Image (spheres, helix red, strand yellow):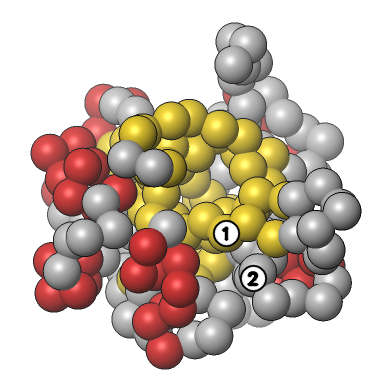
Amino acid sequence: MPPLAPRYNIAPGSDVLVVRERKGERRADLLRWGLVPHWAMDPSIGHRLVNARAESARDKPAFRAAMLARRCLIPADVFYEWQAVQGRRRKQPFAVRIENGLAFTLGGLWEYWRPDPASEGLATCTILTTEPNELLRPIHDRMPVIIPPDRYIEWLDPRTPEPAVNGLCRPYASELMQAWPITLRVNDPAADDESVLVPDAAGGAPA
């Protein structure tokens, strides 16, 4: 895979770097963000499946098979959440990261869709979400699942028992994270540079 340029604002439908296990080997690939189940008639369903609730993924036809056998890791160093603010039409965006700006990995699922044997297939992914921790709760009612480094192999292994998988889908520790308000510039998918991380006028240093 050629070197990847830094990304600061990745919108659903874009390609994202994913680490997954195939035939017993771990590999990094670019997959489209927005899961398309193998049984889908139209790939546009992926626009509605960019996230999956970890608590119910095994019960949903779109995610059941992937939750059992096709879990993946999605590297990141920041993610965004939007807070509803009373009296304001637009939500306030926040940037969220691990303390000290360290890279981390989101827990995800992947699928392979092919409309017919003669057509080119499409590999897609979704990000799992869980209940928010204390830091994120005032901002949003969900947060992405974050997999710690010492559990990567366990997460990717399709033989990992269901209770262990469920245990990895807990909220990440608040004290290990930072969040700060950013400007509405992040709402523009074309704004893909580090300026989207600058605190807004009402914000300040990451807390």
Residue under numbered circle 1: 111
Badge 2: few (under 14), some or many (20 or more) residues near its Cα, within 10 Å?
many
* Residue type at tag 2: Pro
- Can residue 140 be seen in this snapshot? no
Q: Is residue 154 visible?
A: yes
Examine the rendered structure and indicate whether residue 33 appears above or below residue 52: above
In the displayed structure, 166 sits above or below 185; it is below
Residue in the picture at 33% in, 81% down: 55
Question: Could you tell me which residue is drawn at 43 percent across and 30 percent down?
Answer: 27
The numbered mark, 2 or 1, whose residue comes first in the sequence reads: 2
Q: Examine the rendered structure and indicate whether residue 56 appears above or below residue 104.
A: below
x%, y% of residue 94? Answer: 51, 51
Instruction: Compare residues 75 and 69 and report the one nearer the observer.
Output: 69
Q: Secondary structure at mark 2?
A: loop
x%, y% of residue 59?
42, 89
Q: Nearest the camera: 137 or 190?
A: 190
On screen, residue 100 versus residue 192, left or right, reads left
Q: Which residue is mark 2?
A: 37
Type of amino acid at the residue the image marks with label 1? Glu
Q: Residue at coordinates 36% horizontally, 33% vertically from top-left?
A: 26
Q: Are marks 2 and 1 in contact (CB under 8 Å)?
A: yes
Q: Left or right? Give the position of 115 relative to 71.
A: right
Rounded to the nearest angstrom, the CA distance separating label 2 from label 1 is 6 Å
Q: How many marks?
A: 2
Question: Where is residue 21 drawn, in percent x and y?
Answer: 38, 42
Quadrant of image for the N terminus? top right
| Residue 182 - label | none
